[in-house]
Image (cartoon, rainbow, N blue to C red):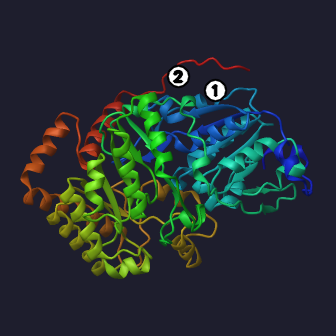
Amino acid sequence: MGNTLHALNVVTPIEVEQDELRHAGSSRHVTIIRPAMVSSVGTWSSPVTPPLGIAYLASMLLKNGNEVECIDAIGLRVDQIIQEGDYVIQGLTIDEIIDRIPSKTDCIGVSCMFSQDWLYFRKLLKAIRARFPQTLLVIGGEHVTALPEFCLRDCPVIDLCVLGEGEETFVDIVNRMHRPELLYKTPGIAFVDKDEQFVLGPPRARIRDVDQIPYPAWDLVPLEPYLETRNGHGVFLGRTMGIIATRGCPYQCTFCSNPTMYGKGYHARTPSDVLDEIEYYMNRYNATNIDFYDLTMILKKSWVIEFCEEIEKRGLKFTWQLPTGTRSEVVDDDVAPWLYKTGCRNITYAPESGDPETLDLIKKKVKIPKLFESVRASLRAGINVKCNIVIGFPHETRANIMRTILFCWRMAISGVHDVGIFLFSPYPGSQLFRELQEEGVIPQKLDDDYFKALVNFMDPTSTKAFCKHVSGKELAFWRFFGMATFFGLSYLCRPWRFVKFVKNVWNYESNTVLEQRVGAIIERFRITKKSSPAPVPSVPVEN
């Protein structure tokens, strides 16, 4: 385990008064790291997005009087793409990251969001510990929340894991870091003690008053590369800022890790608070487009109509998108025109499947007729529509998959602009992951091969699958067949769209996600050919 934990000589925590907790520590210097982006060589889509997580952590630490350094490895070298074996790394190299960590820092926090990046994260964490043997090393994010004991055992240099929402927990860690009797009583953490026993601390309550969370500290990260990137999460519609209006999701889909990360709670900011932030970005950064990264932004009809009415009331002119996926229940012929009128240009629905049996088994709670009503309402309003589909769930047969393919054809004929078909991946923290572990499909002791399989999620050449009835190679075929026939039918029914597609790709413009991704592939190939681990411009660092 990390040297820091041994050095602190952990003792049993004692009861303390709230006032003492609040004043437990003085100002500290904290370095927060968002590592480089990891993908497979064949990945066709690697959106480059601002580091929302570390920017929120930084803002909360600053609010509590700490000194903060953010190292966003992607934004600092978004033009550097290096192939390492079967992987592609975009951003700063590990050595370049470590060279930017100030020697005076008291605590280093690393964001570990995605399980497919774990092998790279582990390498980075070990390199950090080698350079900073006595500095408190903390990791957090969805991957860590799902597998805290695994992370601590697989990478013993880690001192603490932050579970779930990190803002309040990380502030408490920094305040208490030189008070072991307080530190190891902090709610929302996990660690391995001096006797090599895994300790899961008391759970931390969710942040309910989300309006009180300070805006992300964007001044601490290189924001300009993201504002102008054409390889963001949504379609490029100008200078783009990412934002979240809600936290959590009340649904319990079996393939999703949200129940482990956030629980069942769903907390929405007030529309006025969201628009205050958007208006600030328009004035401060000249933003013209907003991408919402919420798990499920549109859940309550009253909320979204109030949001749209407030945009009109303020006279704000900007475009906005829902690129990560949302539910369909609320979007109808009353809501969709409001969305378009106030600037919404792209919606991604996430039905995941077109097969009723699969929808029932994965607890998606989607009614296909209602979904089509919502899709048609969005299309009538003039909004571009994309649907995300997953095939290869453990129970699925060819019949299940064919019903989903037929569903995709119906979407193409209905006028849906894009579809993304992905192979199921069992992510830690999800119900299906636990079930596959119990069945022995996934080993109880996770190995490197498991994480190597996850990194191929966006790789159309990948044949790794966890389906009991259909092979990985066949699933890869159905994936290609489904997308090819979807776009073939779409362009056959509306040939002008194909003409527009060719024109937009040629001019490196986009109105749809497909056009965006094809253009990004061309740009990524260009960058990869010329990239090399060139020296990073020096930045003055106080030691």
Q: Position of residue 486 (x, y in %)?
A: 19, 62
Q: Mark 1: give few (<14), some (14-19) or many (20+) Cα within 10 Å.
A: some
On the question of residue 88 being in view, the answer is no
Name the side, left or right, on which 148 lies relative to 397. Answer: right
The quadrant holding residue 47 is top left
- The answer to whether residue 192 is above or below residue 76 is below
Question: In the image, what residue type sits under mark 2?
Answer: Val
Q: Looking at the image, which residue is at 42% across and 64% down? A: 300
At which x and y percent is residue 138?
71, 45
Is 152 on the left-hand or right-hand side of 347?
right
Q: Position of residue 96 (x, y in %)?
A: 58, 28
Q: Are marks 2 and 1 in contact (CB under 8 Å)?
A: yes
- Residue at the spot 33% in from the left edge and 61% down from the top edge: 349
User: Total marks drawn?
Assistant: 2
Q: Nearer the viewer, residue 137 or 170?
A: 170
Q: Would you name the residue on which mark 1 appears? A: 99
Q: Which mark is residue 380?
A: none
Q: CA distance from mark 2 to mark 1?
A: 10 Å
Which image quarter is the C terminus in? top right
Of pointers 2 and 1, the one earlier in the residue sequence: 1
Query: Which residue is denoted by mark 2 in the rendering?
Result: 536
Q: Residue furthest front?
A: 313
Disc 1 marks which amino acid? Asp
**SS at circle 2:** loop
Front in this rendered view, residue 209 or 447? 209
Question: Residue 465's x, y, as percent?
Answer: 41, 67
Q: Residue at x 42, y 55 (%)?
A: 456
Dot 2: few (<14), some (14–19), or many (≥20) neighbours within 10 Å?
some
Q: Please say if 455 is above or below 51.
A: below
Q: Is residue 440 among what the camera can see? A: yes
Q: Residue at x 56, y 39 (%)?
A: 216
